[in-house]
Amino acid sequence: MQAVARGLSPFLLACACQISAAADGIDHPLPGTTPGDPVRGRAIVADRQVGLCLLCHTAPIPEERFQGDLAPSLDGAGARWTVPQLRLRIADSARINPDTIMPSYYRTEGLVRVAPAHQGRTILSAQQIEDVVAFLATLKGNR
Ligand code: HEC
């Protein structure tokens, strides 16, 4: 348990048992959040300074040109994955695939080469994670 939990943000630490039991998702919204807003989530995914998602992924956000091709398209993510599965994949993708190039957006420790100004801070806030998950859940494909 200690070894599994090392390097996770306090929330993930607190619910590490729950995650290892479920293995593939975070069942409950992150603490202190209101229900995710898909409109805000879309803006985070589209924003190259905030989410960076389009560096690697394509998404059905037609106004953004030059989208990435290093990762699966986000279109259809809401059909392929449940909300708990999406939440874990954004919060800490490395839990699914330790070799992934996708950043762990809600993890503060166990990271290498973090600039001093960013140490101890997650890339996205808990609320931003919920907003992104709410947006992804709307992407059912066929666009
Ligand atoms: C540096 C590249 C990179 C960035 C930035 C990135 N991802 Fe990923 N993502 C990946 C890769 C590669 C995968 C494929 C699985 C793996 O290798 O872990 C993936 C997998 C996923 C999946 C599961 C895809 C599927 O349907 O199989 C979702 C959902 C996802 N990413 C969402 C996001 C979101 C939302 C953001 C921004 C907040 C983001 N990713 C940022 C590289 C990235």
Image (cartoon, rainbow, N blue to C red):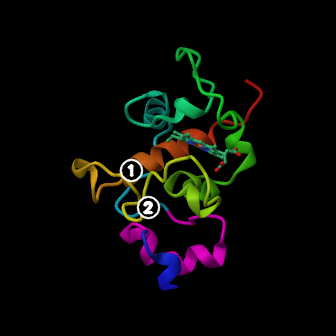
Q: Nearer the viewer, residue 135 or 124?
A: 124
Point out the tag, 1 or 2, that comes first from the N-terminus: 2
Q: Residues under labels 1 and 2: Cα distance?
A: 8 Å
The x and y percentages for residue 107 are 42, 60
Residue drawn 47% across the image and 50% down it: 130
**Residue lying farthest to the bottom in this orientation:** 1
Residue 134 lies, with reference to residue 68, above or below; the image says: below
Q: Quadrant of residue 57?
A: top right
Q: Is mark 1 within 8 Å of ligand 1?
A: no
The answer to whether one can see residue 36 in this image is no
Is 15 one of the magenta-colored residues?
yes
Can residue 44 be spotted in the picture? Answer: yes
Q: Which mark is residue 60?
A: none
Report x, y in % for residue 73. Answer: 68, 33
Q: In which quarter of the image is residue 94?
A: bottom right
Q: In this view, does 102 lie to the left or right of 126?
A: right
Residue 30 horizontal side relative to residue 57, left or right: left
Quadrant holding ligand 1? top right
In terms of secondary structure, where does tag 1 sit?
A: helix
Q: Which amino acid does label 1 sit on?
A: Gln
Rendered view: 141 above or below 61: below
Residues in magenta? 8-28
Residue 37 appears left or right of 23: left
User: What type is the residue that disc 2 sits on?
Assistant: Leu
Disc ID at residue 30: 2
Q: Mark 1 points at which residue?
A: 127
Q: Residues within 10 Å of mark 2 (few under 14, many from 20)?
A: some
